[in-house]
Image (cartoon, rainbow, N blue to C red):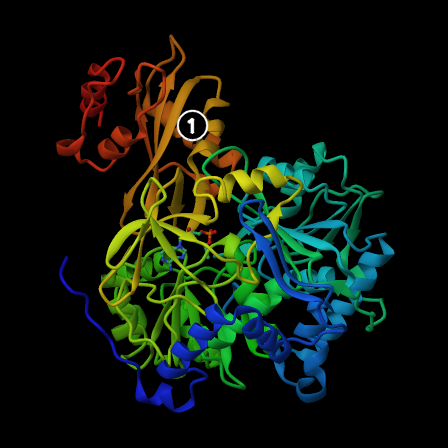
Amino acid sequence: MSEAKIYPVFDAIKATTHVTKEQYQAMYDRSLNDADAFWAEQAEEHLDWYQPWDTVSKYDFHTADIKWFAGGKLNVAYNCIDRHLPARAEQTAIIWEGDDPNASQHITYQTLHDKVCQLANAMRSLGIVKGDRVCLYMPMVPEAVYAMLACARIGAIHSVVFGGFSPDALRGRINDSECKLVITADEGLRGAKPIPLKKNVDKACEGTPSVEKILVCQVTGNKVGWQDDRDVWYHDLVDFQETSCEPEQMDAEDPLFILYTSGSTGTPKGVMHTTGGYLLTATMTFKYIFDYQEGEVYWCTADVGWITGHTYLTYGPLSNGATTVVFEGVPTYPDASRFWQVVDKHKVNIFYTAPTALRALMGAGDEYLETTSRASLRILGTVGEPINPEAWEWYFHKVGNEQCPIVDTWWQTETGGAMIVPLPGATPAKPGSASLPFFGVELALLDDEGNVLQGEASGNLAIPRSWPGQMRGVYNNPKRFHEAYFAMYPGYYFTGDGCRRDADGYYWITGRVDDVINVSGHRMGTAEVESALVLHEAVAEAAVVGYPHDIKGQGIYAYVTLMAGEDYSDALKAELIKHVRKEIGPVATPDVIHWAPGLPKTRSGKIMRRILRKIAEDDYGSLGDTSTLADPSVVDDLISRR
Ligand code: PRX
């Protein structure tokens, strides 16, 4: 492999950075060699506690038992709001930028405090108490952030479900965690298109025995269905509440939220994060990886429905007292210069987005950049999938005018915060590499037998020690937590990613090694799409794989076998695509349906996905050994149908 380019650290960044190269090395070494002392110092420095912890860390990856700061008491909303009030009551906490380019709003820390307290009181009036689960199915409006913080304030556990998921997908998530309350909006608005959130909730809640109330925020004002004994308008209940609300004193290990994510098997897992360790990871990583400086405006384009919208839109920035932009719209409305117009409009200093958005905007043409200056930008970030060097270079040269370091942040819903990432003032960047581990993160590359690989190597990325932001469990399912993450390589947390370490010790993520596809930076389990397909009456069997896609990174490629007598027609292909969108949501839309009257199976009936991946990639030369197939002729048949 040819040696990658290296971009040195900018002198301008070095001048004010929190962490120089020397400091990084010293802090990193200490974070591993004297871990508990390091984390205790960080927890004291970065968070306000009602009561100190008894033990810094206690964990065992063999039993999947993980605790940080046990016995310590704190409140996340207090840390994200109240503690800033003496100095920053009038500073903007949230800049809301509407889908409509003429709509925006500045919300100060004082207003944020008042709004969150009102909603927290409203939730209490609906009978929500510490430990109850509350589902948030929200568009990107300030109320989405208020709702997360209001839950945190009273100790309710939020479960945010991305507004692009279907009623069925929403119902599954509500039922799995038995949510008592759903907070939603009449509709969302994306690219001038209304998204029927309340309608979807109504449908979902046809089968959700735990749901007592639905709190509905008015966003578009269009008419929605209503059930008087269950539905409550947000403004009717919330706007008249007291603007103060005593925060619940939470144990560091009390759950903060559940967020569902796809795995290689079964239904989505309710990834559970707790209070103290998660908030420390969110706070520290935000400060160091974006090298956040007092007074800066920060914009993360992720939706609150994903982990990035939790850690780096809400908790990380607000815990640091930063100004965070909440954007309701899409990158291409009214046109492909929208991101850059918003950067200029709000003088954004730090900008964090996904490679898929960059590739789409790069494809739209540089003329959309040329009408904006982007002069306020200081730091750029990416997340969600490997960034191809071409997109990296475009981001660096064109978007950042060669003035801004790029932080390529590798992490997962399960890790809570960034794990492999260059620090702007410390780490020279190599386009396409997430570079070096964050403080406290010990990485291992393992071969398939679990042997540790040294030096330059490619292998399975695993982590032998805990860090504060690590997920604590799969909600209500400890067995699944152990099986999914700790059973594969005993003593390690297994990430599911493949990775290469180069001669400089830089890490290059190569993608998932399990049956998870990364579509536009969003995780989709192949099993989920397969289950949706076989629910259709015409489908006998389905096998789904990922394949390289220019914009999305990976696309969804579905091989489908129909029931005997069904007609393999284009009309049915279109119907199946619609069917999957209905079952899971637009995020799961198959890009290709490939008719497969036969699937390549071993004699024991196992589908050989390796072969299906190769055919999807158009790579017939390296199909490998097909002699173990029950019927090798199906391969030729599949190729002829491509
Ligand atoms: O495969 C990795 C990829 O996204 C997966 C995690 O997905 P999710 O839990 O949805 O979280 C996405 C946002 C943190 C990882 O297992 N991934 C994430 N960031 C990167 C990445 N792959 C390469 N480079 C990244 N920077």
Instruction: Answer yes or no: is residue 105 visible.
Output: no
- Residue 460: where, in percent of width, then height? 35, 48
Instruction: Check disc 1 and report the residue beneath it.
Output: 576
Position of 71 with respect to 327 (left or right) is right
- Residue 577: where, in percent of width, then height? 42, 32
Disc 1 crowd, CA 10 A, few/some/many (<14, 14-19, 20+): many
Circle 1 SS class? helix
Point out the residue furthest to the top here: 565
Q: Quadrant of the C terminus?
A: top left
Count the marks.
1
Q: Quadrant of the N terminus?
A: bottom left
For the residue pair 178 and 137, the one nearer the viewer reads as 178
Instruction: Answer yes or no: is residue 446 visible.
Output: yes
For the residue pair 503 and 132, the one nearer the viewer reads as 503
Q: What is the three-letter code of the residue carrying label 1?
A: Leu
Position of 370 with respect to 102 (left or right) is left
Q: Quadrant of ligand 1?
A: bottom left
Point out the residue furthest to the front here: 33
- Residue 42: where, in percent of width, then height? 58, 76
Residue drawn at the location 68% of the way across and 73% of the way down: 79
Residue 342, compared with residue 467, is above or below; it is below
Residue drawn at the location 80% of the way across and 65% of the way down: 248
